[in-house]
Amino acid sequence: MTHRSVEVPVIARVEGEGALHITVEDDEIVDLRLQIYEPPRFFESFMRGRPYADVPDIVPRICGICPVAYQMSAIHGLERLFEVEVPERTRELRRLLYCAEWIESHMLHVHLLAAPDFLGFDSAIEMAQRGFRAEVERGLRIKRVGNDLLAMIGGREIHPVSPVVGGFSKAPRARDLRALAPRFEDAIAEVLEVADWVGTLEHPAFPRDAELVSMVHPDEYPMNVGDLASTAGRRWTADRYEEVTRELHVEHSNALHSVFTDTGEPYFVGPLARINLNEATLTPAARDAARRAGLAVLPEPDPFASMAARVAETALALEDGLRLIAGYEPPEPARVPVRPRAGRATWTTEAPRGTLYHRYDVADDGTILDAKIVPPTSQNLRHMERDLRGFLPAALDRPDDELTRLCEMVVRNYDPCISCATHFLRVDVERR
Amino acid sequence: MPRVRVIGCGNPDAGDDAVGLLATDRVRDRVPEDVEVVTAPTALHVLDLLEGAASVILVDATRTAGEERPAGTLVRVEAGPDGLPALRSSLSSHGVGLAEAIGLAAALGDGPRVVFLGVEVGDVRMGAGLSPVVEGALPGLVDAIVDEVAAEEARP
């Protein structure tokens, strides 16, 4: 029996660690366990007993990478329960905020995580040192457009423009937002170049059946609003989320695994699921980017097409963002009055990594009695394991380091959240 | 542009992982006004914060794998032209760690001089407070940052 531990970092950030254990016996996988650390459970209990108005300040702490998503699922759910109607302009400003988060998250994933894999580099550092510096810089330049927009409307200043139940703490000025427009225009041109480049990258093919899940909306590519749908024809709404799907406790992981309640089968969420279920609402630049990145024909369930889907969605977020900036007028009022009432608040939004479900049980004075948060990474966990089981048999003859790289690529297609799920993947292959 | 920037990194809700943030907060009143003191929720934010400063002092919690250092141990590492080799793990995959952020800034040619100051952590469970041993190390870490700032300011 051989056992080898492949990953021993000298020092690592202590948040979020992941490990993959594979046991191989006579060239067959006899055991495969993906372990991922997940903090939402702590925050769920942390919110019990607190006033509803604290929730938008607490939930962004769950994830340093997608704080907007956490705020948006919470705020929309509570507003629906409290029967709060916000102005259309508030809705548009929230969509703009979400666009910024998609831009930032997707460009980071494509350039710093996925591209080095596809090009055979250990990291973006090596990639930049060995001939791809311009590509890395271009990716970071596009990403920075998202950062700067977020800094303006998400609020990292002393008196931030922050999202609250009822709208925003205050509205950004139109001329501040409009100053960003030329950079959005440049970034749209650049992201199409990224699409051409991604289209040239070779990647493994992994055609396999899968049920993909995303929100859908008749008039806009889904971010904040929409029903849920699957590629197998299911259709439901967030208030039935816990009925249609359920979370399994798995012994080897403190994260929960999501499956459909009726079939017990896993599903997967994220950019590839969104683009498959929402082709009709892609913007022209997004359609162009998808085609140029190699995602010309939908449906395409191959998980290795996820990188192309992220590029297409970046184009969409930039183009939609530019439209929203051009038409922006401050919402009035920035914050509408809210009167809490008792009941259950449920909502989903489309985080960069996929559908994010929140549920809050609220007392009549607005105190949070119970909270439940299902992040995209935990919905995808079981499907990641299924993909690994499906993909690995053909690769078991490879040496451990190559096998490790392939495992990482399979898992990376899902872009498991860096801080809310996985920081690094330690792969143990035990051969018997 | 600030000549020296102090960046505290960490998770305020995860026990000893907050040590870098707490130390940075305590340092604000003890460094000259032209020194910028900021915090970063993730290493990714550090990547953005490496721009536009001549020197960066990065403060964070650390954990050694392999040869164990006792919790509370102060760690100081200077980044070389290729980043922080001692912090680098070539297989670090699903995130961009501090080492990668610094290495990338160096590879792109606009990286500042970086000194890393850390404390070896014990309990990093969500919701845990600072462990007594790491709390005991905190004043030493704060002093180390102040000294490091003075040394950077004195550089020609």
Image (cartoon, coloured by chain):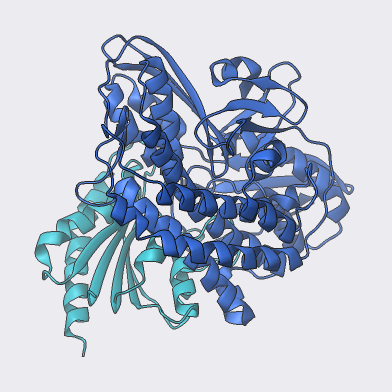
Residue projecting furthest to the bottom: B156
Residue A368 in view: yes
- Establish if B136 lies above or below B47: above
On the image, which quarter does residue B81 sit in?
bottom left
* Placement of A242 over or under A398, stated as above or below: above
Q: How many marks?
A: 0
Give the x, y percent position of residue A375: 53, 34
Q: Is residue A285 left or right of residue B63?
A: right
Q: Nearer the viewer, residue B78 or A223?
A: A223
What residue is rendered at 78% in x and 35% in y? A210
- The location of residue B129, given as percent across then percent down, is 28, 39
Please say if A212 is above or below B24: above
Quadrant of the rendered image containing residue A246? top right
Task: Kindly identify the residue that appears in the image at 33 percent across and 43 percent down.
Answer: A329
Nearest to the observer: residue A204 or residue A86: A86
The chain drawn in cyan is B
On screen, residue B78 above or below A207: below
Colour assigned to chain A in the rendering is: blue
Residue A164 locus on image (x, y percent):
31, 32
Residue B16 visible, this angle: no
**Which residue is at the front of the view, A99 or A71?**
A99
What residue do we see at 78% from left, 53% from top?
Answer: A296
Query: At which x and y percent is residue B44?
Result: 44, 59
Q: Is residue A225 left or right of residue A399?
A: left
Q: Is residue A343 left or right of residue A431?
A: left
Q: Residue at x 27, y 53 (%)?
A: B21
